[in-house]
Image: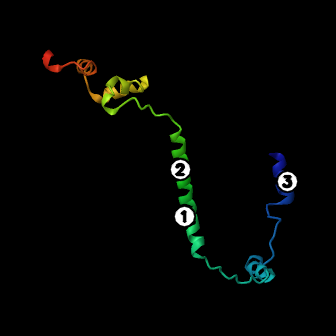
Amino acid sequence: MKEDTELKKKIGKENPFKVPEGYFENIVPEIMKQLPEAEAQESEEITMWERVKPWVYMVAMFCGLMFGLRVMMMDKPVNKEINAGNVSMTDSVQGIPDEYIDPILDQAMMDDYTLYMYLTDADLEIYN
């Protein structure tokens, strides 16, 4: 603290940096004088093809993607032995992972008895 007060006494509180008078008022015109003259550029006319080109490329990309997916899906063997009429409930449920079965049952809103009857294909009339 003592050194700070001694420095302030020796140097003072005045700002030692000064800007010439009228510097900020004249700086913009001076800079503009030093810049070269800009030539007006003519705008190029955009043709119809240049406007449509991105859309054509996008359509071609989606067509290629769909064709590629079709080719990839044709490689999978299809089991022709299963007819739509011969599919049982157990065949369709076997492919479902176990972690999905509980939420499905919760959404079905079945109690245990109704679920048992449904899964065993029991006739409800004989139990009532």
Which callout, 3 or 2, points at the residue further toward the start of the chain? Answer: 3
Name the residue tied to disc 2: 67
Specify whether 128 is left or right of 93. Answer: left
- Toward the right, the furthest residue is 10
- Image coords of residue 72 (percent x, y): 54, 42
Q: Up-down: is 58 above or below 115?
A: below
User: From the viewer's perspective, is 58 left or right of 128?
Assistant: right
Does 115 sit above or below residue 59? above
Residue type indicated by callout 2? Phe
Residue at 56%, 58% in the rendered image? 60
Residue 15, quarter of the rendered image: bottom right
**Which disc is residue 7 wearing?**
3
Other-residue count near label 1 (Cα within 10 Å), few / some / many at <14 / 14–19 / ≥20: few
Crowd class of label 2 (few under 14; some 14 to 19; many from 20; radius 10 Å): few
The residue positioned 51% from the left and 45% from the top of the image is 70
The alpha-carbon separation of the residues under discs 3 and 1 comes to 72 Å
Q: Along the horizontal axis of the image, is 64 left or right of 33? A: left
Which residue type does callout 1 highlight?
Trp
The location of residue 99, given as percent across then percent down, is: 43, 24
Assess whether mark 2 and mark 1 are in contact (beta carbons under 8 angstroms): no
Mark 3 or mark 1: name the one nearer the start of the chain. Answer: 3
Image disc number at residue 55 = 1
Residue 79, image x and y in percent?
44, 31
Q: Earlier in the sequence, mark 1 or mark 2?
A: 1
